[in-house]
Image: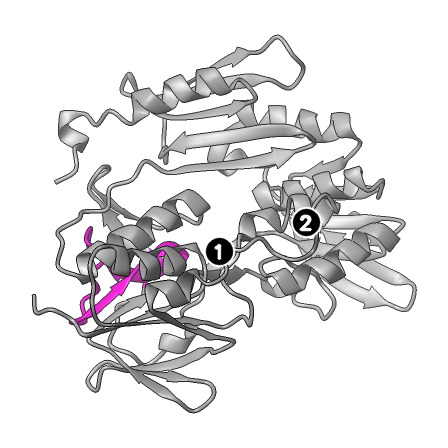
Amino acid sequence: MSTPERIVVVGGGPAGQRCALALRRRGHGGAIDLVGDERLAPYDRTLLSKDALRGEREPEPVALAPAGAYAEAGVTVHAGARATGLDAHARTVALDDGRALSYDRLVIATGGRPSLPPALRCDGVLTVRTAADVAPLRDALVRARHLVVIGGGFIGGEIASAAVALAAPVTLVEAAEHPLAPVLGAEVAEHVTSLHRAAGVEVRCGAAVTSVRRERDGWRVALADGAELRADAVIAGVGMVPAVDWLDGSPLTIDDGIVTDERCRTDVDGVLAAGDCARWHNPRYGRSMRVEHWDTACRHGEAAAANALGIDTPFAPLPFFWSEQHGVVVRYAGHAPEWDAVEVQEGEQPHEWVARYLHDGRLVAACAAGRPRDFAAARRELDQPTKEHAPT
């Protein structure tokens, strides 16, 4: 691999930010451009649905690097610039202000955007992804007499938790039998339901939303079981989709994200991808996967930087994520698309537990509410690769 002179990183989230600074730290002597579609310097998005939404932190986002860090590292930040197209033959990235950035290596780390199924596509339905989303969402939590949050995943659960903290009556609607059931399984997810209900959240499970209508006196949310909910505000947290629309017409293979190998390389010469927008081959598990969580994105960006410079670095992480709901920290590590058994051990305090997911007698994932020592022990066990799952 030839030594690149100019490396362009598209995406101002954790993967892009980590990649840009790691390039210089690993010895790259050429130009580094970091393109982000927000006017703010890269910041911590994980706090948007936690501290910032509850008002426990100033609305100003928490920067991922100190002021001046990018200039000191010689990274040119193009804030408020959105990538609109890729010319892989000419090796240029088109921006919405008319400029085209040339590159020797390109790292795409454009993350994801909130998913809104057709039934939820109505002007005024709120989502949270960027700092600009926090003010209207927090205003809804403060002013509304009743909120409906659609989606019982981690984001939806954190929004419901923030609503309770602000004394806003809230109904959490989840199509599955329990919030997080597709990830945690029914037995463990039932604990999450209990946590919400104990905090005062009305939880409606097993009924998908069929329509959302805005009327003069508020909102009507229709469910598949025939029920209809009234609300002053509707907030959707039903998942993310890769932010790759700008790559339509490019030669990149896109299938639930930009497809790469274990070294972050796409099938187009000189182009790599990392973070929420990438679906990569994880040699730890011998399969392709896309993970939408902070820890993985940060490490993915670091790996992309190394591989962009020709430093052979297979990306084989143990996925990890966490959430805080109603004052309880829930942590998850591993990858368990299937399991044979779940061992659940209750804690001494209410809403404390640790779950161990087993497949063929081997621990493949762990989830805990509270109990940090038990979770740390399980995570160490998970991080010991077996012979057949060792990175290549």
For label 1, the SS is loop
Residue 258 on the magenta segment: yes
Which amino acid type is shown beneath numbered disc 2? Ala
Q: Position of residue 192 (x, y in %)?
A: 62, 28
| Quadrant of the drawing holding the C terminus | top left
Q: Is residue 85 above or below residue 123?
A: below
Residue at 25% x, 51% y is: 303
Percent coordinates x, y for residue 48 in the rendering: 62, 51
Crowdedness of circle 1 by 10 Å Cα count: few (<14), some, many (20+)? few
Q: In this view, does 119 lie to the left or right of 11?
A: right
Residue 341 - label: none
Looking at the figure, which quarter contains the N terminus? bottom left
Which span of residues is magenta-colored? 255-278
Please give the name of the residue rendered at 68% of the width and 53% of the height, measured from the top-left corner: 209
Q: In this view, does 377 lie above or below 47?
A: above
Q: Is residue 196 magenta?
A: no
Residue 208: % across, % down: 65, 49
Q: Compared with residue 324, is residue 54 higher up or lower down, i.e. above or below?
A: below
Which residue carries the number 2 mark? 52
Mark whose residue sits in front, 1 or 2:
1
Q: Which residue has dot 1 on it? A: 66
| Residue 56 in sight from this viewpoint | yes
Q: In which quarter of the image is residue 15?
A: bottom left
Q: Which of 89 and 53 is in front in this view?
A: 53
Ranked by sequence position, the earlier of labels 1 and 2 is 2
Is 89 on the left or on the right of 327, as rendered? left
Left or right? Give the position of 114 relative to 149. Answer: left
> Farthest residue toward the left?
1
Q: Which residue is drawn at 37% across and 36% down?
A: 337
